[in-house]
Amino acid sequence: MLKKKRRYKRSIDTPVVIAFFLVLVTILFFAAWKLLFDSDIKGSWKLDFEDEGKTYSYGFTFSDGQKAEYSYGGITYLGSYALDTEQNTVRITASGSGRDLDMHFGYAFAGNAFEGRHLILTNQSDVQLPFHSGSRYEPLVQPYEDFKPDEKLLGSWLYKGEDQTYTFTFDENGRYAYVCDGLTHTGAYKVQDGIFTYNLIVDGGEVNENSCSYTIDGDKLTLSTETFSDSLTKQ
C-alpha cells in the first residue's frame, strides 16, 4: 500500500522577508533623520523678544512654490524666497502698497522635533535671529473697548482705482483686514457718528491710529478725508 506524501505549507521566501525588512529599516531611518536633523526651511517660524520695554514679534512662513510671508505687528507681506544651499543664504522679496522689500540672510538650523526646531537667520550686520518653529504668525490686534458693530458695514468692500486696488473686510468682533497688492494690514476698528477709526500695531508694539468719515448707501461705502474720497463696492 502506497503512503501519501505529506504536504507542507510553503513558507514565505527568505528574499521577500529580507526585502521587506530593508524597506522598513529605510523608512524608520529617514523618519528618525527628519525628526533629529530636519533642514527643510518650509513651515512657519516666529521670533519674539523685548528691548527697552518694547515687545517685538516677527514671523516668516515658507511654502511650496517658493512662496514667502513676512509678518510683524499687524502687517503681513506676501512674496517669494530663494535658497542658496551652497552658501547657506536665503533671499526674501516682497512688495505691497508701493513698498518693496529685499532681505538677505544667512541661515542655519538648530534643535530637533523633540526639543523644538530653530531657524537661525543672520542679517548683514552679523546679528543672529533665532526663530522658533510653530504655528502660522497671528497678527497683533488691540481691540477698542467701546466697539459696537454696524451691521451695514460688516463684510468685504472692494475699491478699484486707476493706480490702486484694495479690499477692506470688517467682522462683528471689531477686527478689520486691509489687503492691497501683496500687503495685508490687520487691526481693530470702531465706528461712531459717521467716523471710522482704525488702528494698526507696527514694529515694537507701537499703535498707529487713523480716522476718516464714512457713509453707506446700499452697496456703496465711501471713505473720505480732506485729501481723498474712495468709493468701495460691497462684495
Image (cartoon, rainbow, N blue to C red):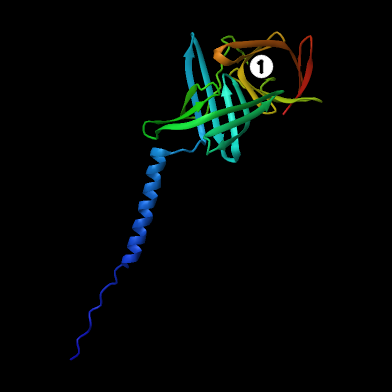
Would residue 80 be visible to someone looking at this image? yes
| Image quadrant assignment for residue 17 | bottom left
Tell me which residue sits at (54%, 33%) in the image: 89
Tell me which residue sits at (48%, 23%) in the image: 128
Mark 1 burial class by Cα count in 10 Å: few <14, some 14-19, many 20+: some
Q: Position of residue 177 (x, y in %)?
A: 64, 23
Tell me which residue sits at (60%, 27%) in the image: 103
| Furthest-left residue in this view | 1
Q: Quadrant of the N terminus?
A: bottom left
Compared with 84, 60 (above or below) is: above
Is 234 on the left-hand or right-hand side of 173?
A: right
| Furthest-bottom residue in this view | 1
Tell me which residue sits at (37%, 48%) in the image: 28
Would residue 142 be visible to someone looking at this image? no
- The residue lying toward the viewer, choosing from 80 and 233, is 80
| Image quadrant assignment for residue 16 | bottom left
Compared with 191, 69 (above or below) is: below
Q: Position of residue 23 (x, y in %)?
A: 38, 55
Q: Quadrant of the C terminus?
A: top right
Compared with 6, 108 (above or below) is: above
Q: Position of residue 187 (x, y in %)?
A: 60, 18
Which residue bears the numbered disc 1? 150
Q: Amino acid at mark 1?
A: Asp
- The residue lying toward the viewer, choosing from 216 and 45, is 45
Q: Position of residue 15 (x, y in %)?
A: 34, 65
Q: In what element is the residue under mark 1?
A: loop
Is 232 on the left-hand or right-hand side of 71?
A: right
Question: Total label count?
Answer: 1
